[in-house]
Amino acid sequence: MSTHKAFAIAGTCAMVLPLTAAADFITDSKASMELRNFYFDRDFRNGSPTAQRDAAAEWAQGAILRVESGYTSGMIGLGVDAIGMSGIKLDGGNGSGGTGLLPADLSSKNSRGSQNEYSKLGLTAKAKVSATELKIGSLALRLPVVLSNDTRLLPSTFEGALVSSKDIDKLALQGGKLQKIKLNSSSNYEDFTGNRIGGVSDDFRFAGGTYTLNKTLSTSLFYGNLKNIYRQYFGGVVYEVPLTEKHSLRFDLRYSKSTDDGNFRPLDNQATNGQIAYTLGSNVFTAAYQRMIGDDPFPYIANSDPYLVNFVQINDFANIQERSWQLRYDYNFTTLGIPGLTFMTRYVNGDNVRVAGSHSGKEWERNTDISYVVQSTPLKNLGIKVRNATVRSNFGNDLNETRLILSYTLTLW
């Protein structure tokens, strides 16, 4: 059964139910409006790889309306969710597009500009039995083998079906099938492609779960298959060690093995990565290491996020046989009497990248984030974030980048 037919059937069932059965459907519903004002400036220090220009800069306003119903009463609860998104260009003259905030203007091959506005709608039918839930339609996912991207004006979404269950004590299970992806700056769904490895597919299947042994220890196993392109097996362990009231250690270990699927082309990648974070009051010190093994880069769906500890603001450090390490520092200013203000800085260094038959590839990235969320009325929940990144590479692009993001979420009901 197609996604559209399944959604139509579930929606029809919900509409014909008696009003008494639909009480929870209405009373448990919720809606919110998120506004994002996004300025993006990227400076190509060695020239853009796709166009002879030195910079890309745009400013845009976005709005995201989320509506989630409750479930009808009865053994099988039915519901429906909707997300409506709109983006409007505020500034971005001819030749400065390409930041990913807005769709490209294809009216002229030489314009390098962006469209003035765009919008998109996502609908999701859902059904629930006990602690098992089925969703069909527009999906946002945060799983080790598939992650939606939300780093631009509007988030990306998938089209497909997701089953999640918590019926077994301490075990959370997820599985499903995805057919399309709607990119951050697009109004339309399109087929999947493999990041860095190519290929086209309209079938991604996944399954797995997380078992929480206790409050400090959990383990995860997942499988993902982008049909005719790759198969991926993931295992992870998260272990948190409370030392004292304000001191703790957190270990996050991950391993993925990826092979080819079908007749696209041979593929071989193993990704070993992990991080350890030490919390000392308002300070968090983190160290991470990541290594790629095999003849291919880490495969994942293009325009989604890879589940890697060294996937940062711009780079993923997942090139062929790359080794990378990260040092990170976070600080929360609450203890200094400024609740809502946070600071983060990190440095990632990668080497041993196989380039033109040798292992001479090197790159590094430095990120700094400063965020503040207003804590009291009348501007409560107004968020301001400044993100800065510097990238240098002897085989890729040298970039300087600044993002300024203002966000505000209003609960409608």
Image: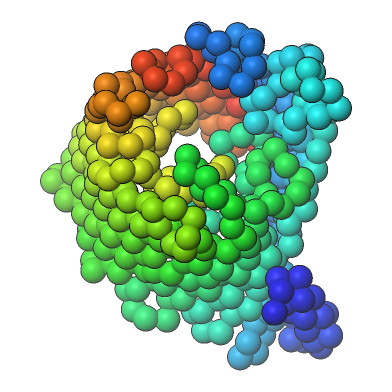
174 with respect to 184 (left or right): left
| Residue 106 position in % (x across, y down) | 81, 29
135 with respect to 189 (left or right): left
| Residue 239 position in % (x across, y down) | 21, 54
User: Considering only vertical position in the picture, is 357 above or below 2?
Assistant: above
Q: Residue at x 42, y 81 (%)?
A: 167
Location of the C terminus (image quadrant): bottom right
**Residue furthest toward the right?**
107
User: Considering only vertical position in the picture, is 73 above or below 245?
Assistant: below
The mark tally for this picture is 0
276 with respect to 99 (left or right): left
Q: Residue at x 34, y 78 (%)?
A: 169
**Residue furthest toward the left?**
243
Residue 384, visible in the rendered structure: yes
| Residue 32 position in % (x across, y down) | 70, 50
Quarter of the image where one finds residue 286:
top left
Residue 283, visible in the rendered structure: no
Location of the N terminus (image quadrant): bottom right
Q: Residue at x 24, y 57 (%)?
A: 237
Q: Residue at x 34, y 61 (%)?
A: 233
| Residue 262 position in % (x across, y down) | 47, 63
